[in-house]
């Protein structure tokens, strides 16, 4: 905690200011929600259900039962309750590509003016409006009297996909919206959160943080941006945690670049933050980088796919599969992954291991999905009369054992080498990044890869 600096428009601000809260009680006579005709929205939800391919027989039956129930009850639901009801049904698919959008939470319900990031040692506040500056750097232990593990477990009922993906992509808006937590039975009020926070000296404190639409900020975008020192859109008068050392880890530099190649002496560092770019941006980068690697033959290649949320897995498949052949004899490809490595980003991460497992090491944290998942649909279903949109999935992937059935498997249309079967997505070298690492400007995952490469 001592190493963290707070920055507001480039100015360093010290910790320890006292908070004042205007937590007015919700009026006791506040009217119940007016009945809303949600027939059209439920009809579209039924069309989504008919289109979605990722359900099993049992989960589809339960989703159909819920939809029938909603026909009778949804018209009397509040807007947050209806949003969470839709999330509950969609989550039964247990598929990370088929979730309900979180944009509704930002645009309709609001978040308290804090932002969090889930490090390997817990959930920490990393950005806040200046009124709450003394909360930055503190760990959240409980919300509204429920310990963080309970909150996570209960909100996972409203999310499809892995726990890792939930933590990186969904936990922030769900955990910080009083209306969402109220609708999920995890809060008594829709305008305030009660947080139990760990203090730097091992104690705990309870604070109330009130919802204020004027201060709440906007949608963050990709999760790694929460760790940047820059203010994000909508963050007027916000402060952010930055390493007290002043050292920005390599992975967070040049955030506007989706792909990078940096020479670290005789080691090539290659970073993918996405698998998509306008026109031929990714293909051109891959071609230029491969030509450079063929000439230089580095002693090791570090292929950083942390924060790679995916895109089009075909755009750089040949490049990723070729990486083990581009290092010098005896060298290795170190693939760095984390919970935000998702979809096509998972393929990019495991193509090198599939091509040459003896010359590839996966280092870092578990990626954000299962070995078997459904994807491949650009169609989102918009529920009429709402801000709710739902992703859909039509084709199967199975990175664990491969996917040979041409009637359902997406990868059967591509070269056989692209239809990978790598068994487990677990990193061979599991390394977490703690809040203390971030505070000190350390990247233990990259550090391990560089040290191991130097020892060979």
Image (cartoon, rainbow, N blue to C red):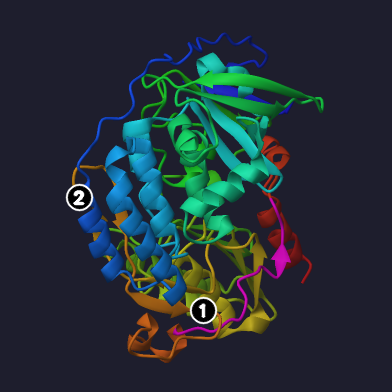
- According to the picture, the residue beneath numbered tag 1 turns out to be 399
Neighbor class of circle 1 (other Cα within 10 Å; few <14, some 14-19, many 20+) is many
Q: Outermost residue, right direction?
A: 202
- Position of residue 144 relative to residue 266, above or below, is above
Q: Does the rendering let one see residue 42?
A: yes
Q: Provide the major secondary structure of the magenta segment.
A: loop
Q: Is residue 324 left or right of residue 122?
A: left
User: Viewer-proximal residue, 282 or 214?
Assistant: 214
Image quarter of residue 205: top right
Question: Could you say which disc has been placed on residue 39 in the image?
Answer: 2
Q: Which span of residues is magenta-colored?
A: 419-432
Distance in Å between CA atoms under marks 1 and 2: 39 Å
Q: Is residue 170 above or below residue 362?
A: above
Task: Between residue 374 and residue 27, name the one nearer to us.
Answer: 27
361 relative position to 221: left or right: right
Classify 414 as above or below 296: below
| Residue 105 lies in the magenta-colored region | no
Which corner quadrant holds the C terminus? bottom right
Q: Say which residue appears at 51% left-offset and 53% top-offset.
A: 157
Task: Describe residue 437's horizontal placement relative to residue 144 as left or right.
Answer: right
Sequence-wise, the earlier of marks 1 and 2 is: 2
At x 58%, y 32%, the residue is 126
Mark 2: few, some, or many residues within 10 Å (few <14, many ≥20)? some
């Amino acid at each position: 905690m001592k190493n963290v600096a707070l920055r507001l428009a480039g100015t360093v601000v010290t910790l320890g200011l006292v908070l004042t809260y205007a937590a007015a009680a919700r009026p006791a006579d506040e009217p119940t929600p007016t009945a809303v005709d949600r027939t059209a929205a439920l009809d579209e939800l039924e069309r989504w259900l008919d289109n979605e391919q990722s359900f099993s027989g049992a989960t589809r039956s339960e989703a159909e039962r819920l939809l029938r129930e909603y026909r009778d009850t949804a018209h009397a639901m509040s807007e947050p309750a209806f949003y969470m009801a839709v999330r509950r049904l969609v989550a039964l698919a247990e598929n990370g590509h088929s979730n309900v959008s979180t944009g509704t939470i930002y645009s309709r319900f609001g978040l308290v003016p804090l932002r969090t990031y889930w490090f390997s040692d817990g959930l920490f506040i990393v950005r806040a409006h200046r009124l709450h500056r003394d909360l930055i750097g503190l760990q959240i232990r409980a919300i509204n009297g429920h310990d963080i593990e309970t909150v996570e477990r209960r909100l996972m009922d409203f999310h499809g996909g892995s726990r890792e993906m939930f933590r990186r992509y969904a936990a922030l808006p769900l955990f910080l919206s009083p209306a969402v937590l109220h609708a999920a039975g995890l809060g008594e009020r829709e305008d305030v959160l009660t947080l139990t926070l760990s203090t730097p000296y091992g104690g705990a404190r309870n604070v109330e943080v009130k919802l204020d639409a004027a201060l709440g900020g906007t949608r963050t975008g990709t999760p790694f941006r929460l760790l940047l020192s820059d203010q994000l859109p909508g963050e007027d008068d916000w402060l952010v945690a930055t390493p007290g050392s002043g050292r920005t880890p390599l992975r967070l530099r040049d955030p506007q670049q989706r792909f990078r190649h940096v020479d670290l002496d005789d080691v090539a560092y290659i970073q993918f933050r996405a698998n998509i770019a306008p026109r031929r941006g990714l293909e051109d980068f891959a071609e230029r980088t491969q030509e450079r690697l063929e000439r230089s033959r580095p002693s090791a290649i570090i292929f950083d796919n942390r924060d790679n949320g995916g895109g089009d897995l075909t755009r750089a498949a040949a490049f990723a599969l070729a990486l083990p052949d581009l290092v010098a004899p005896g060298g290795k490809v170190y693939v760095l992954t984390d919970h935000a490595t998702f979809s096509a980003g998972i393929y990019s991460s495991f193509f090198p291991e599939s091509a040459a497992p003896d010359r590839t090491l996966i280092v870092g944290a578990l990626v954000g999905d299962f070995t078997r998942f459904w994807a491949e649909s650009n169609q989102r279903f918009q529920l009429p009369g709402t801000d709710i949109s739902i992703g859909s999935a039509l084709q199967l992937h199975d990175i664990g054992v491969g996917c040979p059935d041409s009637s359902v498997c997406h990868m059967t249309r591509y070269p056989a080498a692209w239809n990978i079967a790598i068994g487990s997505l677990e990193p061979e070298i599991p390394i977490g990044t703690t809040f203390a690492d971030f505070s000190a400007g350390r990247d233990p995952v990259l550090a391990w890869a560089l040290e191991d490469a130097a020892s060979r």
